């Protein structure tokens, strides 16, 4: 009987120890051990290594408590192999984000690079809104295409004529006869085309990519 009591007590103690909550640092170590070791290929096909990724993140000061908490929330409860792949992807995403920020900061110091980046970003936003409008209004595409392109050219003319961006934005937002959604989308198109003109693209419509 005493032996049985001892076994019961020991089992309870072990279960309590097993249920003890782990720190985010302990969870990180577990997840790092689960991550694929050696070099492995992700979606891009570029070989990546969890050790190198973590060293890059540490050198950039990126493995802080906020990062570890998010890592634990996203990856820790996943099945063993999935949690390891999740960890690799999580570190890779964070390293890529930091490297992108560094490139953008470096680019801002170079006039030519900064100009190209602003053109790229404005064109991306212009196409995002254009595709969204077309997708949500399949029966009015011809009319909307004409209006969006006319608005884009007008915004460029306005920019070159000295009209400030805030005024362009306000003028579009006050246009009657538009639904709140369409008005916001027209405003975003005008802003993008104004920025394109500011960076030397007089006709922003040339940056609109064909849907098909």
Image (cartoon, helix red, strand yellow):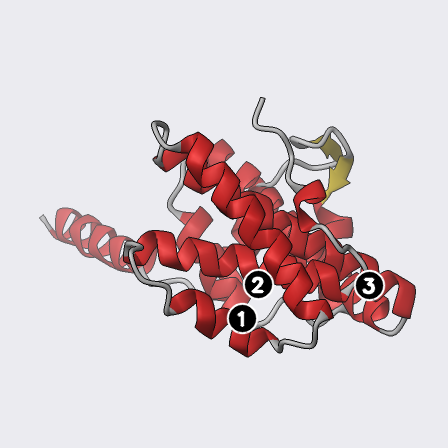
Q: Nearer the viewer, residue 70 or 78?
A: 70
Horizontal and vertical percent for residue 67?
A: 54, 65
* Residue 159 lies in quadrant: bottom right
Tags 2 and 1 touching, CB below 8 Å? yes
Q: Which residue is mark 2?
A: 191
**Which label belongs to residue 41?**
none
Tags 1 and 3 touching, CB below 8 Å? no
Q: Residue at x 54, y 77 (%)?
A: 166
Q: Nearer the viewer, residue 175 or 57?
A: 175
Horizontal and vertical percent for residue 108?
A: 82, 71
Q: Is residue 15 visible?
A: yes
**Residue 102 located left or right of residue 177:** right
Nearest to viewer (mark 2 / mark 1): 1
Disc 2 and disc 1: Cα gap in Å? 7 Å
Which type of secondary structure does the marked residue at label 1 adopt? Answer: helix
Which type of secondary structure does the marked residue at label 3 adopt? Answer: helix
Q: Residues within 10 Å of mark 1 (few under 14, many from 20)?
A: some
Q: Which residue is mark 1?
A: 168
């Amino acid at each position: 009987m005493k032996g049985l009591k001892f076994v019961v007590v020991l089992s309870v103690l072990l279960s309590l120890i097993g249920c003890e909550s782990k720190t985010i640092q302990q969870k990180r170590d577990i997840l790092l051990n689960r991550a694929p070791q050696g070099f492995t290929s992700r979606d891009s096909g570029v070989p990546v290594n969890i050790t190198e990724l973590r060293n890059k993140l540490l050198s950039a000061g990126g493995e802080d408590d906020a990062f570890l908490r998010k890592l634990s929330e996203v990856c820790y409860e996943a099945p063993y192999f999935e949690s390891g792949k999740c960890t690799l992807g999580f570190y890779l995403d964070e390293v890529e984000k930091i490297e992108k920020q560094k490139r953008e900061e470096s680019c801002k110091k170079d006039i030519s690079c900064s100009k190209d980046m602003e053109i790229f970003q404005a064109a991306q936003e212009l196409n995002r809104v254009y595709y969204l409008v077309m997708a949500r209004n399949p029966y009015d595409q011809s009319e909307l295409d004409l209006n969006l392109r006319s608005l884009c050219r007008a915004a460029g003319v306005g920019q070159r004529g000295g009209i400030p961006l805030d005024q362009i934005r306000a003028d579009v937002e006050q246009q009657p006869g538009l639904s709140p959604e369409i008005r916001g989308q027209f405003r975003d198109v005008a802003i993008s085309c104004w920025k394109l003109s500011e960076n030397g693209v007089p006709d922003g419509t040339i940056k609109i990519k064909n849907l098909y």
